[in-house]
Structure formats: C-alpha cells, structure tokens
Amino acid sequence: MHKSTQDRLVFWGFLTPTLFAFVMIIIVPFALGVYYSFTNWTGASGASIDFVGLRNFRAALQDTRFFYSFGLTALYALASMVVINLVALGLALLVTQDLKLRNIYRAGFFVPNLIGGLVLGYIWQFIFNSALPQVGKFLGWKFLQTSLLATTPRAFAALVIVSCWQYAGYIMMIYIAALQNVPRELLEAAAIDGATGWQRFRHITVPMIAPAFTVSVFLTLVNSFKMFDTNVSLTNGAPVTEFAGKTVFGTELVAMNIYNTAFAINDMAQGQAKAVIFFLVLVVVSLIQVSVSKKREVEL
Amino acid sequence: MKQRMLATLAASVMLLGTLAGCGGSAGGNQNTGGTDAGKEIVLFNLKVEIDQALKGLAADFEKETGIKVTVKSCGGGCDYGAQLKAEMESGREPDIFVLEGPGNLEVWKHKVADLSNEPWVSEVNPDLLGLKLDGKIVGFPVAIEGYGLIYNKEILDKAGVDPEKIRTYSDLEQAFKTIDAKKEELGLDAVVSYTTKETWVPGNHTFNIYLAARDNPDQFTEDFLAGKVDVKSDPIAKDFARLVKLLIDYSDKENLEVIDYNAQVAAFGTGKTAFLHQGNWVFGNLKDLQVDFEMGFVPLALNDSKYAAAIPVGVPSYYAVNKDSPNVEAAKEFLNYIAMTERGHKYMIEEAFMVPAFKNVKLQPTDPLAKSIMKYNAEGRTLTWQFTKYTGKNFGMQKIAPIIAQYGKDGDLEKFLDSLDKAAKEYSTMTQ
Amino acid sequence: MQLRRLFLILLECLTAILFLLYFAPFYIVVVNGFKSRFEVLTDVLGLPHDWNQVVINFNSIINNPNLRFLSSTVSSVIITVGSLTVIALFSAMAAWVLVRTKTRVSRWLFMLYVAAMVIPFQVVMLPLVSWMRIIHEVTGIPMLRTYHGLIFAYLGFGCSLSIFLYHGFIKGIPLELEQAAVVDGCSRAGVFFRIIFPILKPITVTVLVLNGIWIWNDFLLPLLMLGTGNRIQTIPLAINGFVGSFVKQWELIMLALLLAILPVVVLYLFAQKYIIKGMVEGSIK
C-alpha cells in the first residue's frame, strides 16, 4: 500500500507542472473561447457579456469570404503537403547518397527553418517583387518579369513555394532518419537478385519509411492549416478575386480571416466563432488523416 | 497615417491586456514639481521624426518660462495607442498626449481638458477643429496633411501640361491622355503611380473623394454608412467610378496589387511616372530618393463641380491636455507657445517640416508639397476627411478596397456600384 | 564502377546547384543589408557599391531607440532559455510517469495532451489575454508583460508536442533498467533523475531544437503577451518595428535579420552533429 501511495504521489507530482500550465494556458482559454463564441463579447474589459445563441455562427456561415478562405486553405494544405513531402523526400534521397559534401548539404537545407515566418515572408515579398523581375529582365523570361504576387493563382503558388522553402529541410530530416533505418543488406540482396533501383525503392524503401510518411504528412498538413505569419507578411490577402458573386481577398487563408474578423473588422465574438468552426474542421481532418495513414502503413 | 494590420492587432490586444499593467496608479495626481518655476510637463510624442525638433523647442520654452517640458517619443515599431495606455499607468501620466481621431477620443474622453477658450482656436479653420467632446474643443491640431495627385513638374512641362489648369475631370483625363501618348519619349512606365495593394489608399483616400466631393458631405457620409443611400442612382457614384477607372487604366495595371507604398513612391521618385496618388507625407521618402524636380498637387477631380478642384485636407493627429494633471495651465501655455509665437512657427515649419493648421503663420515652408497644401488651404479649395469616420472597423481597407481592386480588373460599372451599395448596407447592419 | 562514379559526380553537381539555388535568398539578404536605401530601391541584385555602408546601417540599428537591439537580444535569450529549461524538464517528467503508469487516468491524460495539438492558436489567443488579466486581478500576480508570464505560456503551448516526443522515446526504454535501479535502493523519483533523464539526451536535443526554433522566432504570442514598445521585447517584435511601419527600410530589415539569425545559425552549425543525431534518433520512434 505504501508503495502505491508513493507511486501516486510521484505520478501527480511529476505531472503537475505541465498539467497546470496546460490547463491555465490552453484548456481554460479554450473553454472561454467556446463560451465567448456564443456571446456578444467585445474583448473590452468591463463590457457586459450577453448570450446571443448561434448568431455568431450564423454570421460566420453566411460569410462568403470565410467560405472562400476555407476552400483555399484546404487547397493550400493539400498542395503544400504534396510539394513539401516530395521535395523533402527528394532532398533526403540526394543527401543520403555518397556525396562528398553531404553533411554540408544536410545542415544547409535545414537553415531556412531557423528563420521566423513573419520576417521570412517579408523577405520573399521583396524577392518576388523586386529581385525576381530583375532576374527575369536579365534572362528575358517573360513569366518572371511581373511579380509572382500579381495574380491570385500565382500568389497562391508563391505561398506554396515559400512554405516549401522554409519547411522542406525539416521534413527532410525526418526522411533521412527513416532512410538510415533501411537495412543496407536488404537493398544489396535485392540488387543481387536483379531488382532495379525503382523496384528497390518502391518495394523496400517506401514500406520501410512508411511511418515517416505518416509523421510528415501529419505535420505538414496541420502546419499548413494553421499557416498565418507568412501569409500576412507575404501577400496579406492580395490580390482580390471573385467568389460566388462577391469580391474576396484571393490569398486570405482561414487563420488570417479569423484574425481580420476579430481585429480589423473588430468583431471579436464572430472571430471566435470562426475559430471554433476552424477547430472542429481541423479535428475532423486530423482524424481522417491519421486513420488513412495508419491503414496505408498496414497495407504497405 | 500608419494604417497597418499589426498595429491594429497590437492596439486591440492591448485594450484587452494593458489594464493588467501596474494597477493602482489610475487616479493619477502625481505632481512632480512643488513650486511653479520648477514645474515639469511631460509631452508624449507620436512621431519620432520630430523628436529632436520638439526637444529644441522645449528647451527654449523652459528658458522663457521656467517650465520644463520633457518630451517622450514613440515611433518606428512602437504602437502609440498601446504605449499611451502604459504611460498612463506608469505612475507619471503625460500632461500632453496625442489623439489620432474620434476613435482614440472615445478611449480617452475621461482624460481630456476643454481647450475651447484658448487663443489659438480662432486661428484655425473650423473644419480642422474636428476633435470635439460635447461641443467643446479638446484637440490641438498638431499639423495638417493633404493628399491628391502629386505631379512631377519636369515631366508635365515636357509634355506640355499645365498643372494649374487641371480643375475638372475632363482636364485630368486630357492631361493623362497627353502624357500617355508621349510615354516613350518621356521615359515613363505609366502615367500615374497608384496601388490597390496598400488597401488604405483606395479604401480610405480614393473613396473619400466620393464621400466628400459634394454638398453637405458630413450628412451624406452618415447616411451612406447607415445604409440609407442608393448608390446605384447617385450620379456622383458614376463620376467616382469614372475617376477610379481613369486612375487604374493609366497606372501599372498589371502590378496594382503588388505595388506597395515603397514601390509606389519609388516609381514616382525615379521619374517613371508623372503622377503619384499620395499625400504630403511622402516628401521625406522622396528626399531619400534624392529627387530634385519641382512638384505639387493636382486634385483627384471626379466631375466638373467646384469640389472636383479641391484636395482633401485633414488633421492626422491632435494634442490633448490631460485634465487630471496638476499642470493643465502650463501645458496649455506650451501649446500656445507653439501656435502663437514666432519661435513656435519656426519649429513647425523649419524644424519639424509640418504644415501648420494656423492662419497666423507667416513663414513659408521649403517643402514643395507642404507649400502646395498651404496654397489650397488659403484658396479654400479643400475637402474634408470623411474616411476617419469608418476606420474603426476598417471598412475602407477590408470592404471598399477589394471592390475597387476588382473594378480595376473587370471594369463592370453596374457590379461596382452594386457592390458598394451592398457593402454600405452590410456595414450598417454590423453588430456591436 | 566507373559508371557509378560518374553518376555520383553528376549527382554531386546537381545537389550543389540545388543547394546554391536554395541559398540564393540569403544572397539577396546579405547584399541588400550592405546597401544604402537608394541603392536598395534602384539595384536589388548587384553587389553593393560601398561595403562600408554596412557600418552606417549597423549603427542605425544599434542606436535605434525603439529597436533596442541589444536589450531585445537579451530578452529573447532569457525567454528562450527559460522556456526550454522548463519545457524539457517538466515534459520529460510528465511523459515518464504517463508511460510507466498504466491506468485509465494516465491514458486519458496523454490523449488530452496529444489532442490539444490540433487546437489552433487562433482559438485560444483572444481569450488567453483576458484570462491572463483575470489571473492578475484575482491573484495579484502579473502575467502580461513579464518574463515569467510568457515562459509559463510557452510551457503550456510547448508541453503537448514535447510530452508526445518523450512518450514515444521512453516507451522504447526497457523497464528492467529501472527495476534494477529500484533494487539498488533508488527511490521512484531518483530513478527518473539518475537513470532515465540522462538516457533521454538524444530526444531532449530534439525537443530543445524544435521548441527553440519556434520560441526564438515566435511573433504572435510575444505580441499578445508583451505588446510592442514595452520594457521587454523579443527580437521578432523589434524587427517588426522596421518591417511593419509605413515605409519598409529594407536595408535595415535585411541587416537586422542577419544579425538576428546569425547567433542561431552559428549555434546550429556548431551543434548540428548532435542536433541532427538527436533529431534522427528522436523523430521516429
């Protein structure tokens, strides 16, 4: 009995610091946030908070701009997930070869990840608007001469490019780790049996690194859905486009839409309602993704 | 004029947050000096650019009156609204602080002293005394600013266009066409440097023309924002659409949503455009670009009424006096020193490079844009700033700007007017 | 074999070109950090006419009263180091007891931590600030605009992922190790600090790197908790002063950015062997 008491003491003692911070920083504000989304909360202290039912949710769901942001974010998450993982896997395959400078490459590709998204977006804005058009003029390439941020599809591509530049090095590390766990003997044995490079990759390497796919897809997906800093600094929503008969900001992802609703348009409660909707969608997406990946892992 | 998103965030957040600061000092009757001669007033300044000039003025003021003025400045990355809250809780409240408009006054209305009976009031055009609380004047106009189309005199001369003669829409259109025809030989990329990327330019400044260039603009704006105006049947709306189209068609159309403030000013400053849709605040940036051509303003003329020949002039910031301060009189004296003495005039014109709101100022500014604005002001060719009435919810930047940008792309007049109409009605029903 | 060598040389070239392209943005950052305002606006790609311009730019950064670059650096270091210490220590402790205690409460708590990872920051950011204010009013402990408040917040936001990572790693540590220690007379807590925590070194490096990059660069949370222009400001907040203002002073932004990332990059290059090893061992378990 004495031992079990001591165990329980240690259990709760060791848990308390994180649990306390976790509850105070995430759980309580989260609960407050859900509560506020049903009220006319303005954020100002002292103002009375009245229950308004589903009004904020109705307003959010009737907002064309919010819908557009949602669709765009889904598209963006999908695009960047694919691009980042392909690039990262490609880089990982490259730098696990017997290259002379492979340690430098490994370290180097990771460096963009050390820079914060906000400043990074401003730098890329400068590159897209000022540097690349000059390169385009120099090379005589028409498509580079106008800024990549000038039309909505191009600006969307720019967002994906920048996230890929920032994030691929990180995901690459995960793939490197996985690739190093693939037993060399297995690959060599297959080679002796006459398997081509592609066959070895498809039938040995890919199944062996399946857990890395799961982790990477999850990380890129969730991060893309939460994308905010780079969005603000790189495009700030521009250029505008038409959606369902309304003019909307063409590259405003959902996190930025929430932020604008709360702070720019100054409707804190509706912004909070949108955040709650956003959260629910994220939960669903995550659950689907994890279950799909798990299933695939088994199949592979 | 700093319209930026992050500042909005910071300001809103600090509204939530700063009250947590150092509680207990809110009452604020902290008298630091005992005797009259040893009095010290604190001025919390908004613009770090004028910090040195203001300190110089304060030193001379102290020599003359024995009242010490401590200047604290907030600039660069500092968000004034948030920082002011912190200063107010710091244990030494500023005696003079800055209010940027009616929105800020709402926050600080319990702190402002009545300035209605100050001598400088009679020297200011009543339109520019807009900061009022229950009919009492509570704001000292720090400076005035104006905007319109800034022209490059050198290019206009070469093209044979006289800026003085641009007073109606047809004049403006003609001028644009003339210059556009000679674009190659003048070495221009476009006639006018415009942007829809910086949403405050179309959403606040351009749109203000629609609201202000008419009889009784205050009433109209109020009706418009209350959703009581039928935009589609308003003839001035069509005139406005025509002006927007002109601006967009003769600018670097492809890059309108890419050109930021820097690029916009740089295109004009390096002689790549003949006009620039901005205000006199760009002069410092143009100086960085080492410009040496003559320049001035032509109006954003939308039709041939007398209002088309005028430029919007307003007050971006006011000084307010802290009414809980034990030094109210000393603070008022310092404001008078700025407005009513030659030393003060010298400070405003020659040291801080501002356009004074006061009619008694005899000195001429060297800044050509300031000169141009003073000329418009003297001739009475000014419009009011209506856009300050809707900046609280960023109606211009969030709702109007995209509509203007979209109109620039498809030129669909009917849709444009319809969208403006809907936006106003939506605004009028917004809760809170 | 000849063919294989040729292939490798080709691959080496390809990778090198890719690598240079990948680093091209840094070229833009560096050269423009060394230019004057006028030059930045007129010639973006070229080398600076006068490299000494950097001294002028450097001085305007160091002497900028609002930027307070040195004190911002100190604040950033305090916040990052403080947060990393508590996150690593407390998360490891929590993860260990969660792994070694097989009760429903334990499983349920672990699920809660993991599930919270999908809560987007936007959902909690607005209420968080007013909640912090309430805490101050009730307990008298100021949370906003203080080091401890921000570090506490980072512990709250950072513990989920860290516990998740530690949890995965600890699962792979054989229980016999601990049992042997218990036989030797170690107390339960002693087992953790003497036996387990040292074994956790590789995953601890991962946790430190992941959280360190995030905290060092984080913008929105410091903005919410510290505000702008207050006594305590982090480097991203300071740099935002340059970037977010009316006129973008690109040459100063670029140089300030260089100054800001230099310590991180140097630290990274210095320790990258351990970092990569840690990440490699820690990322998939």
Image (cartoon, coloured by chain):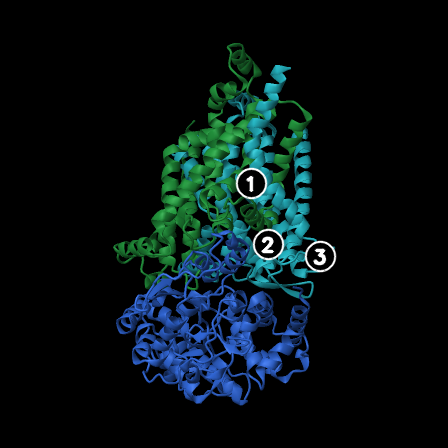
Give the chain ID for the cyan colour: A
**Which mark is in front, 1 or 3?**
3
Q: Amino acid at mark 3?
A: Leu
Marks 3 and 2 in Cβ contact (< 8 Å): no
**Which mark is in front, 3 or 2?**
3
User: Which x, y percent locates residue A217?
Assistant: 60, 39
Q: Colour of chain C?
A: green
Nearest the camera: A38 or A289? A38
- The answer to whether residue A198 is left or right of residue C261 is right
Q: Amino acid at mark 1?
A: Asn
The residue at the point 30 percent across, 80 percent down is: B342
Circle 2 sits on which residue? A253
Nearest the camera: A146 or A114? A114
Q: Quadrant of residue C13?
A: top left
Q: Does label 1 or label 2 sit earlier along the sequence?
A: 1
The image's mark for residue A85 is 1
Give the chain ID for the blue colour: B
Query: Alpha-carbon distance for marks 1 and 3?
Result: 33 Å
Q: Secondary structure at mark 2?
A: loop
In what quadrant of the picture does the C terminus of chain B appear? bottom right
User: Which x, y percent locates residue A211?
Assistant: 60, 31
The answer to whether dots 1 and 3 both sit on one chain is yes
Residue lying at the far top in this picture: please name it: C183
Q: Does label 1 or label 3 sit earlier along the sequence?
A: 3
The residue at the point 62 percent across, 51 percent down is: A73
User: Which x, y percent locates residue A22?
Assistant: 58, 38
Query: Alpha-carbon distance for marks 1 and 2?
Result: 21 Å
